[in-house]
Amino acid sequence: MNKSSENSGGEVTTAGVNPRGSKKTHAAVTSSGSAMQRYQDVIVGRRSFTGTLYFEFCSWLALVPGALGILLRKWFWRRLFGSCGSNVMFGSNVLLRHPHRMHFGNNVVISDGVILDARNTESSDVLRIDDNVMLANNVSINCKGGKVHIGENTGINAQTILHSVADSPLTIGRDVIIGPQCYLVGGSNYNTEDLTTPIWKQGIKPDGGSELADDVWLGAGVTVVGGVKIGTGSIVAAGAVVTSDMDSMSICGGVPARLLRKRTDEG
């Protein structure tokens, strides 16, 4: 059984956490300790009784519909986060994990059903969303041992998934448009060299993370795998799978994605 401990900063850690600052959810949920301690480790992010009570109160507010719910969450939720700017709006049924590791700029809109998971015990600055960002319904952002940063004036459409693991950050620049049902990941591949060990036990390969520069447009259903950089002003056609870097001002499409033309080419 895994043993839990507390570091010098007063934050709970658990034996069995991998070097990248995350732990498999199943292992965390089924480890030793009381049910309350496991809940605090996995959901709340720290073992504070008063903090847990406040988190529970705010979780109930997630269910309140309509304008009243938006107003109550605007008033009370800001205290959950590492930092929260002015005029941040949260829709209903938003799910939070380790909210004290999240930071929001001004005029951020989080729509209904969004999942924000900042489970990286190595950092207090795991998920950062800058000014004037909008997350549409059912967007999912997961930082299990990784980090996600979304630049200002960016829009992320419905049912898109952003995923960062194994110390492989996902960085999205300013003025980016991401279509619905996209999948962007940092740390997308498992180690597979040991043929005698199940793949899931071999862990994720750190790949340096993925990056979308400023003013990128991804069409619907685009996949960006780990370790890929997409340059400024580029466009990716709907349904493409981007497996290698794209230069600035590129237009690409296909599976795997390939360069179709440069935006600077007339005609």
Image: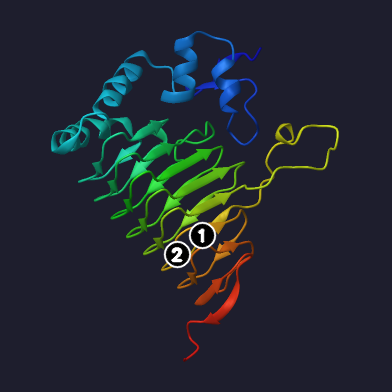
Q: Going by the image, does 44 lie left or right of 257?
A: left
Marks 2 and 1 in Cβ contact (< 8 Å): yes
Q: Going by the image, does 242 lie left or right of 35?
A: right
Q: Is residue 45 visible?
A: no
Q: Which one is nearer the viewer's eye here, 186 or 200?
A: 200
Which of the numbered marks, if any, corresponds to residue 222?
A: 1
- Residue at the spot of label 2: 219
Which class describes the residues within 10 Å of circle 2: few (<14), some (14-19), or many (20+)? many
Q: Secondary structure at mark 2?
A: loop
Q: Where does the image place residue 42, in percent across and percent down from the top left?
A: 48, 24
Q: Going by the image, does 14 lie left or right of 159?
A: right
Q: Quadrant of residue 28?
A: top right
Q: Considering the image in quadrants, where does the N terminus appear?
A: top right
Q: Where does the image place residue 226, in percent across and percent down from the top left?
A: 61, 53
Q: Quadrant of residue 49?
A: top left
Q: CA distance from mark 2 to mark 1?
A: 6 Å
Q: Going by the image, does 231 lie left or right of 1?
A: left
Residue drawn at 60 percent across, 28 percent down: 24
Q: Which one is nearer the viewer's eye here, 149 or 90?
A: 90
Q: Quadrant of residue 91?
A: top left
Which of the numbered marks, if any, corresponds to residue 158?
A: none
